[in-house]
Amino acid sequence: MNKIGKIGFLGGGRIAQAMAKGFISAGLTKAEALIASVHPADTLSLESFQQLGVETIVKNDPVVNSSDIVFVSVKPQVVPEVLTEVKPISDNKLFISVAMGITIKTLEQNLSPKARVIRVMPNTPAVVQSGCSVFVRGSKATEQDAKNTQALLEAIGTCEEVGEYLLDPITALSGSGPAYVFVMIEALADGAVRMGLPRDMAYRLASQTVMGSGHLVRDSKEHPGVLKDNVTSPAGSTAAGLKHLEDKGFRSTVAGAVEEATLRCRQISGAA
């Protein structure tokens, strides 16, 4: 059943848990083919992995020793320390890093020359198997490594291969983007509540509207402007609402948020 091999996780946060759940649900592997190392104080992550039936330990070496693919899912500031710790046993392993701002160069420098590396940028909707991920191959990663990575990431959403130079704007768009969308959902609901809707209904309708609109853009392949025009009748309510958004600088504000987040990503990457 599992052609990918045994999968290990160094770190057990929400993204790691989401990936493990997605891999199992998609039938790519079984729980007994997974292993994770979790900080002893992180009891919530420990319990979450155990509920999936995944072997969970507090040391990193056994994870690397027993895995063919190792996900690096610890916090970015401790990645060099963790990789240096497992470097002596990293030969011929595929390491897939989801740590923000940690470059391919840094990953490869802190592992054995015989280790293969792929860098991934996922986002939080992976928790509900609706993530948006991209990946970058390291210098020694093989075509099969890329295929395995694609298959694994598609178990938790969509996945594309990109050049590393694109990762900062991608992080600003799809990595930070859920936060912008959550604010929009909250704002849509606030407006509806002011006009008389119960708040729980407003959140349900706003979230479904955002989700459905995203699906329509993705699946119809129509330009968003065309889809917008299809909803906008002359002198209608949508036209009035859109005028208010344009008057308040909605488009430039959202675009500016992505630009500012990209610049901050570049600062973080440079510091790392």
Image (cartoon, rainbow, N blue to C red):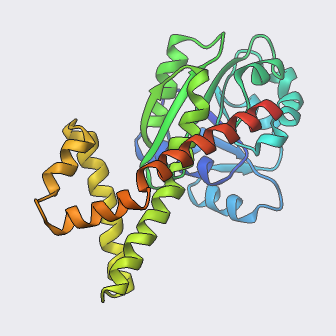
Residue 207's x, y, as percent? 36, 66
User: Does residue 134 appear left or right of residue 269 in this picture?
Assistant: left
Q: Is residue 50 above or below residue 266?
A: below
Residue 186's x, y, as percent? 45, 71
Q: Which one is nearer the viewer's eye here, 258 or 71?
A: 258
Total number of numbered discs in the rendering: 0
User: Does residue 170 appear left or right of residue 67 in this picture?
Assistant: left
User: Does residue 134 appear left or right of residue 55 in this picture?
Assistant: left
Q: Is residue 253 above or below residue 122?
A: below
Residue 73's x, y, as percent? 69, 42
Determine the residue located farthest toward the left in the rendered image. 234
On-image quarter of the C terminus = top right
Residue 272 showing in the rendered view: no
Residue 207 showing in the rendered view: yes
- Residue in view at x 34 percent, y 88 percent: 198
On-image quarter of the N terminus = top left
Q: Which one is nearer the viewer's eye here, 230 or 110?
A: 230
Q: Which one is nearer the viewer's eye here, 69 or 183?
A: 183
